[in-house]
Image: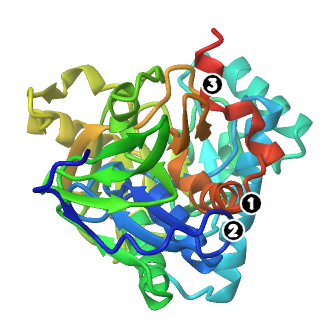
């Protein structure tokens, strides 16, 4: 029996299958918000619950490069390409949005790794991905604002890639979600799934509320493995520490996303840039409460690496930086779908939250409302870990 002191929030009539089904989505990042919005759009009655504010986790510190570059499985590539397609549809509806752009990408590796770059290019071509191998001297013909002498040996240009600023996208989706009658509950504290008779029946929150539902979606970013562990389910976690630096506004001709040996760079709304990389992961300190710190010298080194790439009299300076765990499943592949051990409880956990954000919400909504398993999600089921 539930604790009588726990508040019950608008339980309503349980409708079972299809439109009208009541769903609680846990997580205020792009995957949770997209799933909630698609469900509400498709006729469900949805409550979106988040521990703190919307976009205050990984979605607020993601480079959010829209791509399917490099080597990955055919199924993962297909899902990412579908994800990019949904962003193109959103972009076509309003190409003036400064938080969603498709101005291409540029990649190169460290000196002496020409074969690595060429292998990446060959793999992309084999997938039908738009990929062009260019010499450093030819870079200005494809990507503006980058110093050709910063490029080592050879580079890959991907003209079809883009980027999105997830906090703005989340705000856009939440606007639609609430207009259609969706309910947003922020600062709810940690959520736990209510299980009755082996089936998920809703969630309780850290502020002692209960939300009853026909289905629960867990999209808690890097916290997802710990949340499902409480249900006796194992989802391996490979989430590393990460940092995103946002610069002060600056005039620059760079519009593409740059992936280089020491810094990744993308444009950011307000004429700023967002910067990240992986070389400093071991230099981030994480406290027991999950808060993170890094020596400011690391931030300055990252910014200096970006400055070394840019043409003209451009000098970047850091305006802010955010740190935390970057959601990455233990095997690197996404985790999507209903838990076999807890019917009615669905999980969405992936590294590629930006690229998959819109398509993941769409396909999760499809599965929850129809009861059918979508074939594009079949390779990414959580039960694969139970069979390992």
**How far is the residue under mark 2 from the one under mark 1?**
6 Å
User: Looking at the image, which is closer to me, 269 or 260?
Assistant: 269
Does 265 sit above or below residue 277? below
Local secondary structure at mark 1: helix
Residue 318 visible in the picture: no
| Count of numbered circles on the image | 3
Does 10 sit above or below residue 149? below
User: Looking at the image, which is closer to me, 340 or 37?
Assistant: 340
Q: Which residue is mark 1?
A: 370
- Quadrant containing the N terminus in the rendered view: top left
Residue 152, x across and y down, in percent: 58, 31
Does 248 sit above or below residue 342? below
Furthest-top residue in this view: 388
Does 282 sit above or below residue 252? above
Q: Which residue is mark 2?
A: 18
Residue 125 visible in the picture: yes
**Residue sitting at 69 percent across and 57 percent down?**
363
Q: Which residue is mark 3?
A: 383
Residue 202, x across and y down, in percent: 39, 53
Query: Residue 307, which numbered label?
Result: none
Determine contact: label 2, label 1, CB under 8 Å.
yes
């Amino acid at each position: 029996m539930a604790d009588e002191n726990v508040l019950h929030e608008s339980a309503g009539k349980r409708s079972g299958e299809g439109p009208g089904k009541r769903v609680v989505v846990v997580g205020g990042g792009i995957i949770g918000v997209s799933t909630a919005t698609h469900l509400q759009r498709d006729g469900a009655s949805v409550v979106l619950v988040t521990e703190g504010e919307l976009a205050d986790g990984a979605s607020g510190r993601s480079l959010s490069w829209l791509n399917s570059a490099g080597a990955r499985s055919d199924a993962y590539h297909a899902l990412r390409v579908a994800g990019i397609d949904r962003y193109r549809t959103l972009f076509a509806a309003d190409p003036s949005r400064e938080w969603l752009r498709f101005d291409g990408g540029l990649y190169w590796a460290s000196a002496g790794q020409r074969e690595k770059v060429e292998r990446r290019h060959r793999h992309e071509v084999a997938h039908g991905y738009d990929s062009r191998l260019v010499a450093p001297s030819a870079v200005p013909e494809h990507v503006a604002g980058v110093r050709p002498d910063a490029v080592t040996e050879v580079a890959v240009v991907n003209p079809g890639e883009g980027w999105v600023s997830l906090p703005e996208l989340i705000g856009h989706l939440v606007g639609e979600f609430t207009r259609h009658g969706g309910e947003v509950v922020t600062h709810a504290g940690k959520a736990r799934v209510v299980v009755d008779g082996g089936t998920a029946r809703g969630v309780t929150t850290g502020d002692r509320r209960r939300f009853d539902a026909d289905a629960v979606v867990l999209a808690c970013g890097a916290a997802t493995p710990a949340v499902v562990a409480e249900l006796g389910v194992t989802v391996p976690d490979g989430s590393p520490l990460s940092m995103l630096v946002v610069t002060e506004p600056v005039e620059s001709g760079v519009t593409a996303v740059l992936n280089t040996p020491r810094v990744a760079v993308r444009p950011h709304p307000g004429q700023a840039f967002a910067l990240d990389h992986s070389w400093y992961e071991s230099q981030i300190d994480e406290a027991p409460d999950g808060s993170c710190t890094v020596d400011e010298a690391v931030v300055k080194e990252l910014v200096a690496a970006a400055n070394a790439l840019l043409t003209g009299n451009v000098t970047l300076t850091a305006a802010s930086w955010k740190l935390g765990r970057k959601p990455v499943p233990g095997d690197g592949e996404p985790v999507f779908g209903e838990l076999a051990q807890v019917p009615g409880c669905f999980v969405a956990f992936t590294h590629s939250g930006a690229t998959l954000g819109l398509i993941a919400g769409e396909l999760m909504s499809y599965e929850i409302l129809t009861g059918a398993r979508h074939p594009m999600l079949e390779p990414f089921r959580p039960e694969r870990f139970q069979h390992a």
